Image (cartoon, helix red, strand yellow):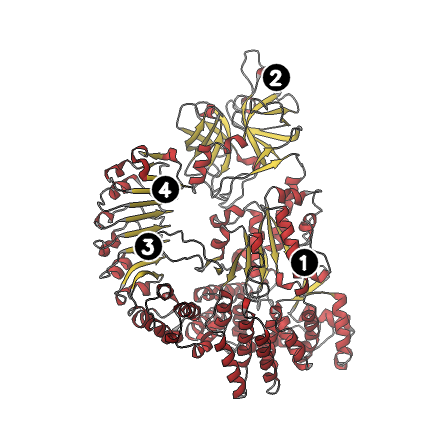
């Protein structure tokens, strides 16, 4: 089996060689549950799998003779190559008095041996009898038939079955403890898993040992067995993977179907997102909240059971939903999201429901919404999945429900999650489609997808060209095009800004290839050129000539497609049936005799579907534009050409119309554009500022004005006055809107000296989103107007990465008193310029800085506080030597390569030390004991190579306070002598 393979439940049974031979079950690839009497008095046991050469040594880290259960851990799995998933096996508690039929034991009894002593698994079917062991707190399993004959010598043929797992379907109920002789071997007495996981020492170890798992498994109540459920779930997972593993990428449709569809493992690009509400800072003793710090989306989803994900068109929302569905069903998510492995995804594409006229689905209908190629599920299956807390609800496109129907969608989603409160959920929506707290009452946290960073654009460009080379002989030319485009992105900020979403980056790659290096300069021109590329030259490049007997010009294509597009926009939907499309085309063809002469609406629709490259079949008989942006672009063209600007403006308060309004500006004539801009300004004036609608509309007016080759000066003045009126931004939503103006907002910003401290802080946050050289002068003004504002200094200190490193250090950071702020350093270039910021005392170093870089960058700095985050290159602390004499606080977080604390002994002034999610060795604790001034030691989820934490060396520090999180008390040696100086947190 390869790494990442999901181990079938039946293959989790293992042989345990302790004091005697017994059986066991893998809870994780490196954690085994068995009976205590199988282990005996020893502290180790060997675990093997029949058919796999050799065995693996496991340590006993928990054992309870009363329960007759033991937990074993090893550094490797007995199944070669199986290292994931980290999620635990499903566990259930019998919550009925009725017999539970259809249960199973899988183990390694003596009777199943062959060729002398060779072991092989055996399977037994039977019934769990809940009342039979109620007083003794024992689970009784009755075999369906006699499993083996009793022997005259009193030995049992079932020896070796102790510790074997007892299953109901895929759920673990317990482990076999004993086969009573007085029952003719027809019964097995078992330890219920519910008693094991409720044992305080067992729970404490799992809660504190992240190497074993991220989470102690939740017990699922079970009252019936459903024999068809496990097999159906396997088929459902396979169907999901088939449906959602592939995605089409714009500009590669001339390849074969196989190559034009990327496997999401290749095409998926992990994007960044930002939480709307900061969480408390886990990186004590930092003083600022850091919850709003951008992170990769997988890291943010890991500990958020319910997420409302906001993102612009083309930002990658749907791709993320597909990726989650495919990998969660297959159990192939990495350790960050391992908790989702094995959950059952239910994908609800709201646009499809809307197009098909379907109601929002009941629980039983969830599995059918995606129209997977699979049979009907067993009755009640989805409800059982959700009741057990194993559902992953993925709701795509809340903004694609008409505005008047959104409360129905809210009620549906709220009712579903209240009925099944343990269901995890991710829902996607456009940025301003619903209010900020729309799902807050249901426990949702909001994340906003962020534009791609420069490195992301480079990675996407490389992946796009790699796919293009799959079916193209001109590999050298494509390599050259890739190099040229990467260089253009590096040297042309305006082009780089256009490529901030996966869709637009793909459009640029395609146009660059077609035009052999020449590219449009505006977003609107980018779309127009893309449509011309698809509609005018696609068939010529592929040497296709009138396959449906229809020939259309680019404008004729657009006239037909924009009739469908405008009908969809007016109806608040994105999908259509063949019947509805034919009605729109019939109306359009009355004014296009040169097209209607070539065939009826049915033939023309077939041509558009097969040849335009802009329409695709979503499900059987349901179609959509390849991306909503093209639908909006063509609808905007129809609104302008049909003289329907006033209709457009009536919808200005509705966020789902904003892209259409913006794209309409590019289609407007010199006479029409002032009407559009004035209308948006009026709509903004009448809107309430609360919720960010006024700001969004003013920004939209300003963006539209940017399209003008010529626009009356008075209109420009109105736009500038309106935008100035909503500065500084009061909320995250207003800040996101204003940031869309990019550098165009900079001349409109008020003088910092005329503002109150909170307003300066808000403008610093806005400026950090824009960043770059253009924002430096105003950042300098903010620094000069500091006035002792700790909040402003903190924002400026953590925003360094957004600006040119040297210039920002010299012009903004150097004049500031940063003694009470944390200066965040995330790039080598910043570290090299640290000497330019002499008044800083606290530095946070994010990422893989080498020891040489640290020594050079920290040389000469007078630092009292250093925090290291996520450094995978640092093996000891000697690189921090230049700061040793002054350092008072040191935080080490997620530095997993650390092998020793060499260098720490030089920090004689150190008063507080934090080690979080990093290795802790006994030798390192001896080094800590040599720090005379140390008053606080915080150990959070420490990695313990030998499973123990020996605090004995620290007894020599009488004033040291120690705080430990994530280590069971039973694994902490020398704790008694520390008394109340030692505290534990869960």
Q: Are there few (<14), some (14-19), or many (20+) residues within 10 Å of tag 4?
A: many
Quarter occupied by the C terminus: top left
The answer to which of marks 2 and 4 sits earlier in the sequence is 2
- Measured as percent of width and height from the top left, residue 423 is found at 59, 47
- Measured as percent of width and height from the top left, residue 810 is found at 29, 71
Q: Residue at x 57, y 18 (%)?
A: 180
The answer to which of marks 2 and 1 sits earlier in the sequence is 2
Residues under numbered marks 2 and 3 in contact, where contact means CB atoms less than 8 Å apart: no
The answer to which of marks 1 and 3 sits earlier in the sequence is 1
Q: Which residue is mark 4?
A: 964
Is 796 placed above or below 194 here? below
Q: Could you tell me how far apart the alpha carbons at marks 2 and 1 are, in whole angstroms?
A: 59 Å
Question: Residue 241 or 921: which is nearer the viewer?
Answer: 921
Q: Which residue is mark 1?
A: 408
Q: Could you tell me how far apart the alpha carbons at marks 2 and 4 are, in whole angstroms?
A: 50 Å
Q: Which residue is mark 3?
A: 867
The answer to whether any part of residue 593 appears in the image is yes
Question: Residue 186 or 347: which is nearer the viewer?
Answer: 347
Q: Could you tell me how far apart the alpha carbons at marks 2 and 3 are, in whole angstroms?
A: 64 Å
- Measured as percent of width and height from the top left, residue 190 is found at 55, 25
Q: Could you tell me how far apart the alpha carbons at marks 1 and 3 are, in whole angstroms?
A: 48 Å
The answer to which of marks 2 and 3 sits earlier in the sequence is 2
């Amino acid at each position: 089996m390869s790494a990442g393979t999901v181990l079938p439940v039946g293959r989790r049974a293992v042989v345990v060689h302790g004091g005697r031979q017994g059986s066991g079950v893998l809870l994780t690839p490196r954690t085994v549950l068995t009976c205590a009497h199988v282990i005996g008095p020893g502290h180790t046991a060997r675990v093997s799998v029949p058919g796999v050469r050799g065995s693996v040594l496991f340590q006993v880290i928990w054992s309870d003779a009363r329960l007759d259960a033991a937990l074993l851990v090893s550094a490797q799995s007995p199944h070669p190559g199986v290292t994931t998933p980290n999620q635990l096996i499903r566990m259930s508690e019998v919550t009925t008095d009725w017999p539970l039929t259809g249960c199973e034991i899988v183990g390694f009894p003596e009777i199943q041996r062959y060729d002398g002593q060779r072991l092989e698994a055996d399977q037994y079917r039977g019934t769990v009898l809940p009342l039979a062991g109620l007083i003794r707190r024992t689970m009784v399993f009755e075999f369906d038939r006699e499993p083996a004959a009793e022997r005259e010598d009193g030995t049992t043929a079932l020896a070796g079955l102790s510790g074997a797992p007892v299953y109901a379907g895929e759920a673990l109920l317990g482990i076999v403890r004993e086969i009573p002789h007085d029952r003719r071997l027809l019964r097995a007495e078992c330890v219920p898993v519910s008693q094991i996981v409720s044992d305080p020492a067992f729970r404490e170890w799992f809660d504190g040992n992240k190497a074993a798992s991220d989470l102690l498994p939740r017990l699922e109540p079970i009252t019936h067995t459903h024999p068809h459920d496990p097999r159906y779930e396997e088929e459902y997972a396979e169907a999901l993977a088939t449906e959602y593993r592939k995605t089409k990428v714009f500009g590669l449709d001339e390849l074969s179907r196989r190559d034009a569809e990327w496997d999401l493992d290749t095409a998926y690009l992990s994007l960044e997102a930002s939480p709307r509400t900061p969480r408390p800072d886990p990186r004590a003793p930092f003083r600022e909240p850091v919850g709003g710090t951008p992170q990769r989306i997988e890291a943010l989803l890991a500990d958020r059971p319910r997420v409302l994900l906001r993102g612009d068109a083309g930002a990658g929302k749907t791709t993320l939903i597909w990726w989650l569905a495919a990998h969660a069903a297959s159990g192939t998510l990495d350790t960050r999201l391992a908790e989702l492995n094995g959950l059952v995804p239910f994908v609800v594409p709201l646009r499809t429901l809307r197009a098909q006229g379907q109601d929002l689905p009941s629980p039983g209908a969830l599995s059918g919404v995606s129209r997977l190629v699979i049979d009907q599920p067993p009755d009640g299956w989805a409800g059982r999945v959700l009741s057990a807390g194993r559902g992953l609800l993925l709701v795509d496109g809340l903004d694609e429900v008409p505005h008047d129907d959104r409360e129905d969608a809210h009620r549906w989603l709220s009712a579903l999650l209240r009925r099944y409160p343990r269901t995890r959920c991710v829902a996607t929506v456009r940025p301003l489609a619903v209010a900020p707290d729309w799902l807050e009452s249901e426990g949702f946290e909001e994340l906003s997808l962020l534009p791609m960073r420069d490195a992301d654009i480079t990675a996407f460009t490389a992946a796009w060209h790699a796919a293009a080379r799959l079916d193209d002989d001109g590999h050298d030319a494509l390599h050259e095009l890739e190099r040229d485009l990467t260089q253009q992105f590096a040297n042309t900020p305006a082009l780089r800004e256009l490529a901030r979403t996966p869709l637009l980056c793909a459009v640029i790659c395609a146009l660059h290839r077609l035009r052999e290096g020449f590219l449009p300069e505006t977003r609107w021109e980018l779309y127009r050129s893309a449509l011309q590329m698809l509609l005018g030259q696609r068939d010529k490049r592929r040497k296709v000539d009138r396959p449906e007997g229809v020939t259309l010009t680019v404008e004729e294509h657009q006239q037909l497609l924009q009739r469908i597009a405008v009908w969809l926009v007016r109806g608040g939907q994105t999908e259509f049936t063949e019947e509805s499309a034919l009605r729109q085309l019939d109306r359009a063809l009355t004014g296009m005799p040169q097209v209607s002469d070539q065939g009826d609406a049915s033939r023309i629709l077939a041509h558009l579907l097969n040849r335009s490259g802009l329409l695709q079949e979503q499900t059987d008989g349901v179609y959509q534009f390849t991306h909503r942006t093209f639908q909006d672009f063509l609808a905007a063209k129809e609104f302008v050409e049909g003289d329907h600007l006033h209709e457009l403006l009536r919808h200005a308060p509705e966020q789902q119309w904003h892209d259409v309004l913006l794209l309409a500006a590019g289609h407007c004539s010199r006479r029409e554009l002032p009407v559009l801009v004035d209308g948006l300004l009026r709509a903004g004036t009448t809107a309430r500022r609360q919720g960010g609608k006024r700001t969004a509309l003013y920004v939209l007016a300003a963006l539209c004005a940017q399209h003008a080759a010529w626009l009356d000066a008075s209109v420009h003045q109105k736009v500038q006055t309106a935008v100035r009126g909503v500065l500084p931004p009061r909320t995250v939503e207003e800040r996101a809107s204003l940031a869309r103006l990019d550098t165009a907002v900079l001349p409109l910003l008020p003088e910092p000296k005329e503002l109150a401290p909170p307003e300066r802080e808000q403008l610093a946050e806005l400026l950090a989103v824009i960043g770059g050289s253009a924002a430096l002068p105003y950042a300098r003004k903010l620094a000069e107007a500091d006035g002792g504002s700790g909040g402003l200094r903190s924002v400026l200190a953590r925003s360094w990465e957004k600006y040119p490193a040297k210039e920002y250090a010299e012009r903004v950071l150097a004049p500031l008193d940063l003694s009470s702020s944390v200066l965040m350093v995330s790039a080598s270039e910043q570290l090299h310029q640290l000497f330019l910021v002499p008044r800083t005392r606290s530095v946070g170093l994010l990422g893989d800085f080498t020891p040489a870089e640290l020594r050079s960058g920290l040389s000469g700095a007078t630092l009292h506080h250093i925090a290291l985050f996520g450094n995978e290159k640092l093996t000891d602390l000697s690189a921090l030597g230049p700061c040793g004499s002054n350092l008072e606080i040191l935080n080490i977080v997620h530095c997993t390569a650390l092998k020793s604390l060499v260098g720490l002994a030089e920090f004689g002034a150190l008063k507080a030390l934090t080690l979080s999610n990093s290795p802790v060795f006994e030798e390192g604790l001896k080094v800590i004991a040599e720090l005379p001034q140390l008053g606080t030691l915080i150990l959070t989820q420490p990695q313990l190579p030998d499973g123990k934490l020996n605090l004995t060396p620290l007894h020599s520090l009488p004033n040291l306070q120690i705080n430990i999180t994530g280590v069971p008390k039973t694994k902490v040696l020398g704790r008694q002598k520390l008394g109340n100086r030692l505290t534990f947190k869960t």
